């Protein structure tokens, strides 16, 4: 049952990626929307869930927040190291983004979607009502996941086929996670720590890369409105499925 329901997440993820690649002539609007979706996912979905799941504190600070900060700094460090390596090999200044960063970010999205599938499977083990509620929440925000996976991979200069491959992997991940949930159990504290780390990395990419790029050549009001709309969409999804 869980695997069958997870197929809805598969289709919704593909729909998000299809939307992202179909509007390339409005790239600044796509990036503005992606940035808003990512900010909404971090602030309204990932971080609250991380704080709930990883309830322990380290020296007076919630462990999830420490890992959130670590994720932000790790993403910054990885990007700077890769950019420095490309510069040392004579990469052009206007093409300073390392494709590896985009692939790594997309791989993190795939990992998150895998965890979503595990959550669907585990919730169905508790009961059909719980499973349905969790599945609806996952399916609703997987459109944003697919949209962001394709956008992130493409933004960093990866070929379209790689972006499509990462999109397909992200779509398959919830189904694989739901199937695997019958054989494994992830401790809640570990899951909360992972969500905090992932949220920090995602926030860095949104704030330091996606949104500045969206406003670089087209500092239009419509781009800002797309960002606000993306965050508001996640708020709506959280409110409906929470």
Image: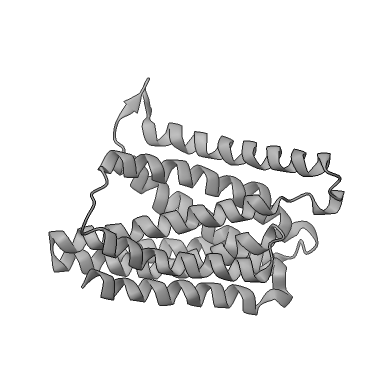
| Colour mapping used in the image | one colour
Residue closer to the observer: 35 or 220 = 35
Report the front residue among 25 and 82.
Answer: 82
101 is higher (above) or lower (below) than 237 = above
Q: How many marks?
A: 0
Name the quadrant containing residue 157. bottom right
Q: Residue at x 50, y 70 (%)?
A: 168
Rendered position, 192 above or below 140: above
- In the displayed orientation, state which residue is furthest to the top: 59
Q: Residue at x 64, y 50 (%)?
A: 101
Query: For this view, does 220 lie left or right of residue 13?
Result: right
Q: Could you say which quadrant of the image residue 204 lies in?
A: top right
Residue at horizontal 37 percent and vertical 39 percent from the top: 193
Please tell me whether residue 66 is drawn above or below residue 107 in the rendered image: above
Q: Nearer the viewer, residue 213 or 44?
A: 213
Question: Does residue 216 appear to the left or right of 199 in the view shown?
Answer: right
The reply, left or right, for residue 167 in relation to residue 184 is right
- Percent across and percent down for residue 131 are 21, 65
Frontmost residue, 84 versus 239: 84
**Residue appearing at x 81%, y 54% in the figure:** 95
Quarter of the picture containing the N terminus is: bottom left
Q: Is there any visible trace of residue 147 in the rendered image?
A: no
Q: x%, y% of residue 198?
A: 47, 46
In the rendering, at what x and y percent does residue 13 appear? 46, 71
Q: Which residue reaches farthest left? A: 127
Quadrant occupied by the C terminus: bottom left
Q: Position of residue 80 (x, y in %)?
A: 70, 38
């Amino acid at each position: 049952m869980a695997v069958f329901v997870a197929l809805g997440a598969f289709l919704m993820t593909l729909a998000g990626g299809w939307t992202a690649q179909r509007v390339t002539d409005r790239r600044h609007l796509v990036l503005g929307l992606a940035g808003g979706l990512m900010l909404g996912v971090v602030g309204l979905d990932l971080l609250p869930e991380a704080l709930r799941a990883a309830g322990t504190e380290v020296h007076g600070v919630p462990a999830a927040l420490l890992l959130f900060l670590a994720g932000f700094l790790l993403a910054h460090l990885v990007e700077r190291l890769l950019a420095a390596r490309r510069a040392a090999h004579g990469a052009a200044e206007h093409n300073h983004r390392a494709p590896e960063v985009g692939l790594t970010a997309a791989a993190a999205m795939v990992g998150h979607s895998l965890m979503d599938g595990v959550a669907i499977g585990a919730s169905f083990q508790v009961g059909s009502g719980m499973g349905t509620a969790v599945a609806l929440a996952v399916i609703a925000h997987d459109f944003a996941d697919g949209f962001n996976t394709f956008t992130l991979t493409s933004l960093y200069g990866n070929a379209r086929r790689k972006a499509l491959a990462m999109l397909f992997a992200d779509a398959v991940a919830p189904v694989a996670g739901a199937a695997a949930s019958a054989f494994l159990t992830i401790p809640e504290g570990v899951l909360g720590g992972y969500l905090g780390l992932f949220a920090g990395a995602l926030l860095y990419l949104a704030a330091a890369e996606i949104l500045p790029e969206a406003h670089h050549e087209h500092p239009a009001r419509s781009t800002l409105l797309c960002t606000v709309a993306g965050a508001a969409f996640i708020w709506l999804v959280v409110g409906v499925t929470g």
